[in-house]
Image (cartoon, rainbow, N blue to C red):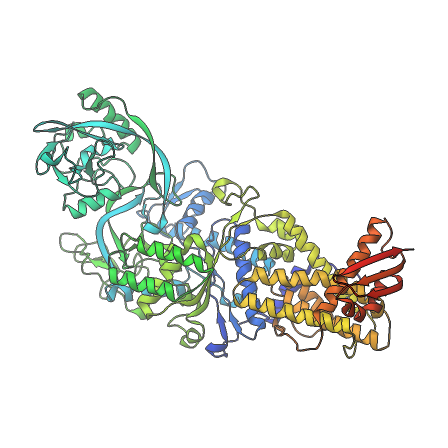
Amino acid sequence: MPEKPTLDGLEQVWVARWEADGTYRFDRSKPREQVYSIDTPPPTVSGSLHVGHVFSFTHTDIMARYQRMTGKEVFYPIGWDDNGLPTERRVQHVYGVRCDPSLPYDPEFVPPEKPGKREIPISRRNFVELCHELTAVDERAFEEVWRRVGLSVDWSLLYTTISDEARAVSQRAFLRNLRRGEAYLAEAPTLWDVTYRTAVAQAELEDREHPGAFHRVSFYGERGPVWIETTRPELIPACVALVAHPDDERYRALFGTTVLTPLFGVEVPVLAHHLAEPDKGSGIAMICTFGDITDVTWWRELSLPTRPVIGWDGRLLPEPPEGVDAEPYKELAGKTVHSARERIVELLRASGDLDGEPRPVSRAVKFYERGDKPLEIVTTRQWYIRNGGRDEELRRRLLRRGAELRWHPPHMKVRYDNWVEGLTGDWLISRQRFFGVPFPVWYPIDEAGQPVHDAPILPAEDTLPVDPSSDVPPGYAEEQRGVPGGFMADPDVMDTWATSSLTPQIAGRWERDDDLFRRVYPADLRPQSHEIIRTWLFATVTRSHLESDRLPWSDVAISGWILDPDRKKMSKSKGNVVTPLNLLEQHGSDAVRYWAAGGRYGVDFAFEPGQLKIGRRLAIKILNASRFVLGLAGDGGEVSEPLDRSVLAALAGVVREATEAFDAYDHSRALEVVERFFWAFCDDYLELVKARAYEESGPGAGSAHAALRQALDVLLRLFAPFLPFVTEEVWSWWREGSVHRAPWPVPEPGDGNPAVLTVASEVLGRVRKAKSEAKLSMRAEVARLTVTGPEAELVRQAQDDLCAAGNVEEFVLGHGDELAVEVHLG
C-alpha cells in the first residue's frame, strides 16, 4: 500500500498489466451455457470518438465486467467499421484526392503533403490504398481511447469490416441470399444522392424542411387549360400523366382524355388514383419520372412509361427523353436542378403558361442522412435483399422475431415494430462507391458488347474473398475482361450495413472456426443506440433469420443520446461535440465512467461536467477509506459487535439489490444502491467504529477489523464494473489476482440487524448538527446525550460506539412514541 495513494497514472499501469496478464482473454474451452457473448458495435472509423461513444460503450463494459464476475466466460470482441462513405469522404479531405475508376493504377503515387483546392483524380486501387492507410491511423487513435476508458474487451479478437475475413463473410452470406432467391438485381427508380453519386436505402433517409415555391402552370386540354400547381416545374419534360382523385367532381370528365404539356407539347393521359389529394393545390398533379416517392407509386400502379431527365450528377441530361422535342429542351440540358428551374420559369412566363408569381412554401423533403442536397430519383440497376417490404408473410415473421427479443428498456420494441410495418420496399444494399466489400459477381458480355445481367457468374465459396475488378471469374482469362464474348465485373460495393449486419458472424468466425462459432452464436447481448434500430438491429435480425432461422442474440440494450448542457443532441454538424481524451486526462477514466454509468438504457442523458468531479471525488474516497481500513493493526477475528453485524447485514441487502438491478440490465440503479451505501459507510459507520478500530487488541477491536475488511472486500467488488482502475489498485494492496476475475459477492447470511446502523447513524447526525449549529468542532464534548423513542433498544446496542464518536460524557436512553435526540453541549 503506497504512502500517498493517488489516482494519477493508474490507467497506464493497469492497462498494461491487464494486457500482459491476459485478464480479459476469452477462454474458448468453456461450454456455451457458461459463455456470455456480446455483439459489440464496431464504431465508424472516420475522425474521432466523442463522449457519446464513451457513454454507450461504458454501459456495455459494465455489463461485461459484471457477467465475468458472476462466473461467465465473456466473449467481448471489438471491431472497427472502416469501409463505406464516411471513410471515403475523410480520405478525400485529408489527402485532396478523388477516385476515378477509369484511371490505371500508379504504384509510385504519393499524395501531396498539402492538399490543394482541386482534388487530384487517382485510380480506384490507389484510392483504396489511401483508405487503408488512413483507417490504420484512425484505428490506433481509437484503440488508445478505448484502452484508456478501460474497456475489458479481448483485443486479440479485434476485427475490421474491410478485412479479408469480414469480406469473405459478407460475400458468402450474399451468395447464399442470392441462391435462395432472397437477393436480386433489379432496374428500378432509386433514391439517389447527387453529391455522393450513390443510391440510398430507405433506412438512411430523413425528412428536412426545405424552402420551395408552388408554380401554377397550364396544361392544354380539349376543353381548355388544366391548371396544376408544382414545386418542380423543371420536371415538366419528364411528365407522363396528370392524376386526380377518382371522387373529385372537378376532374371526373377529364379521366380517360389527354392533355398537352406546356412548352413541349407532349400528349399525356389524365388518370384517377386514390393517392391524389383534392385539397392540395389545384387538386390535380403531374406525374413525372421521377419527382418524389409518390410519383414512383403512381408510375408503378398505373403502368406508365418513363421519361428520365435527371442524371446521376444532379444535372438535367444532355439529351431529351424519348418523345420530347429537342428544341425547347436544349434550354435546360446540362443545367443543375436549380438553374433548370429558374430557366423553365422564365420560359413559362414568356409563353403565358405561368399564372401569377411562384408562391413560397416550406415543405418536408427527403435527404440522405449524411447529405446536404435533396435526393433525386433516378432509374438504376441495384442489388436488393428481401426484408418484408414487399412480402407480407416475411414481414410478419420478422415482426415475430422482434417480439422474441428481450428489449431493455421494453418500450424500444415499438420503434422496431413501427419500422418494419412502415417498410415500402426491399433493402437496397448496393452502393456506387469504391471502398467497401465488392459484390462477388461477374457478368458475361455478349457478342454485341453488352453485359448479360440475368446470367451472373459467381465464385465458389472456398475462393472468397474476391475482388471482381481484379480477380478473374472461373473459366475466363484476364484478357477477356471488357470485350465481347468475355466478362465484366459488377462495379458496385455493398452498403456498409450489409457488412455490419453480420457482426455476430464476423466476430464469431462463421464457417472459419466452427468450434468458436458454436460457443458464441447466437450472442447474449446486442448493445446499440436507438436511432439505428431501423438499420443495424433490424438488418442483423433479417440476415440471421434468412441464414439460420433464428435470432442473432437474446437481449438488446438500447442507449439514449448524449445531450449538451442546453439539452440539445450532440452532433458534429452542430459543433457541440465533446471529445473524451481531455476529459480522461483531466478527471481520470473512473470519473468519466462514473458519469456515463449514471445514464440508464433508453434515456437521453445530458453531459454534466460536474458529475465528473463527483466521480473523481468518489474514486479518491475509495482510495482513502481503503487506506484507513487496511492500515489498521490486526487482521480481525469474529464479527461479534451488534454495530458490526449490522453494517454487514445492510451490505448484504445492497448486494442483493445491486444484483437484481444488474440482472434487469439497470446498471444505473446498481450504482445508485452501492454508492449510497458507501457514503453512509464512510460518513457514519467509519466514524462510529473508529475509536474501537484503533485499538490493537480485544474482541471489540477484532470485530471492527473483521467487519471493516469484509465490507471493503465486498464494496470493491461491487464498484469494480463501474470504477475498474481504483478498485483494481486497492485490490492489489491486499488480494491476489484481479478484482475483475474475483467472484461477484453474494448476500452473506447473518444475524445482524441493519436497523442498528440506521438508527445509530441518525443519532450521530443529530449530534453533528447540534455541534455545527453551535459552531463547535466535531470533537467538542457532549455533556449529556438523551435519546428516547421506540428505537431505544437498537441505540443501546451501539451505545459505546456512539459515545466515542460523539465524545459523549453522559448517555441517557428513554422510551417514547418517536425518536427524539437531545444534545447538551458542555
> Of residues 91 and 723, which is closer to you in this image?
723
Residue 50 place in picture, x, y as percent: 54, 50
Residue 752 place in picture, x, y as percent: 71, 74
Residue 374 place in picture, x, y as percent: 33, 39
| Left or right side of 79 for 707 | right
Quarter of the figure that contains the N terminus: bottom right
Residue 33 place in picture, x, y as percent: 47, 77
Furthest toward the right, the residue is 826
Say if residue 465 shows up in the picture: no
> Of residues 222 and 792, which is closer to you in this image?
792
| Left or right side of 493 for 264 | left
Quarter of the figure that contains the C terminus: bottom right
Q: How many marks?
A: 0
> Of residues 275 and 343, which is closer to you in this image?
275
Location of residue 335 (image quadrant) = top left
* On screen, residue 751 above or below 606: below
Residue displayed at 53% across by 68% down: 663
* On screen, residue 743 above or below 169: below
Say if residue 478 shows up in the picture: yes
Residue displayed at 26% across by 33% down: 232
